[in-house]
Image (cartoon, rainbow, N blue to C red):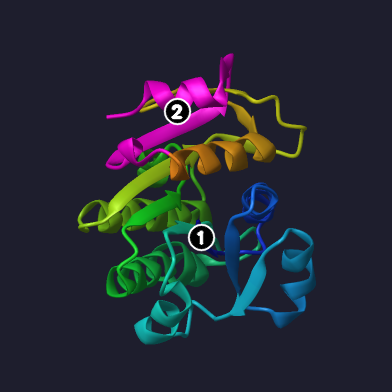
């Protein structure tokens, strides 16, 4: 496969790039900072320098053209304010989906977040509430498109080594999940088109990843 990953320098994206490249797939990671190219190369990916906050659809479409799948793994990240939650977590996700449609790339996997309904909780801070609303809007936007989309909502991310065993379902409790296992689940979802149209939550569990993905097929 040829896979384009938005947010290619993220921790999950780099892990996914390694898994894809190790089995012979072609990986292009979209990054804003050209200095990140060396990290992508170490993971077996090619860097495409595109700023998703300022680019137009045509520029992103050019990067996606010829791809078999698109993965949105970008995020404004910790320390960013309300404005960048909107410009990255929502607007960049919509731009990437626009470009995928224009390029004819139907398979589309988007990383989201759990507990989006907490955005209106008065105990949630302004910035985190903006993040949750942006992720919810990005999900709604993707669901409305004629793409073979899958939305993945991981639990609390850790850098513990992956166990290869997870709990993957439409709804789970909130719990931890190693980034290694998130990347491995993303790989399995890309390989399983019958998961299209699903919004799935992911935490650590007891089920081997291959079996967990097989269990949620349409």
Q: Residues within 10 Å of mark 2 (few under 14, many from 20)?
A: many
The numbered dot on residue 213 is 2
Residue at point 68%, 38% (across, down): 180
On screen, residue 136 versus residue 47, left or right, reads left
Q: Secondary structure at mark 2?
A: helix
The outermost residue toward the front is 24
* Residue 151 shown in magenta: no
Residue at 40 percent across and 38 percent down: it is 192
At 39% from the left edge and 45% from the top edge, which residue is drawn? 151
Identified at 58% across, 68% down, the residue is: 28
Q: Which residue is mark 1?
A: 3
- Can you give x and y, in whole percent of width and height, for residue 206 in the image? 59, 14
Q: Earlier in the sequence, mark 2 or mark 1?
A: 1
Which residue range is magenta in the image? 192-218
The answer to which image quadrant residue 98 occupies is bottom left
| 164 sits to left or right of 167 | right
Taking depth in this image into account, of 4 and 154 the one nearest to the observer is: 4
Q: Looking at the image, which is closer to me, 153 or 26?
A: 26
């Amino acid at each position: 496969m040829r896979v384009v990953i938005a947010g290619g320098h993220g921790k999950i994206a780099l892990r996914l790039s390694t898994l894809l490249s190790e089995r012979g797939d072609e990986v292009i990671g979209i990054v804003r900072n050209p200095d990140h190219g060396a990290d992508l190369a170490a993971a077996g990916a090619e860097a495409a320098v595109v700023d998703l906050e300022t680019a137009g659809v045509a520029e992103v479409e050019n990067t996606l053209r010829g791809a078999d799948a698109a993965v949105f793994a970008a995020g404004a990240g910790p320390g960013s304010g309300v404005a960048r939650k909107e410009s990255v977590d929502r607007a960049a996700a919509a731009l990437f989906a626009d470009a995928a449609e224009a390029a004819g790339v139907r398979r589309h996997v988007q990383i989201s977040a759990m507990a989006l309904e907490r955005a209106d909780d008065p105990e949630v801070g302004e910035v985190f509430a903006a993040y949750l609303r942006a992720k919810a809007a990005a999900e709604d936007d993707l669901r409305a498109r004629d793409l073979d989309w899958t939305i993945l909502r991981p639990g609390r991310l850790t850098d513990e080594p992956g166990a290869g065993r997870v709990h993957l379902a439409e709804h789970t409790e909130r719990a931890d999940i190693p980034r290694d296992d998130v990347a491995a689940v993303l790989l399995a979802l890309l390989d399983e088109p019958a998961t299209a149209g699903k919004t799935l939550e992911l935490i650590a569990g007891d089920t081997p990843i291959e079996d967990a993905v097989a269990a949620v097929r349409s």
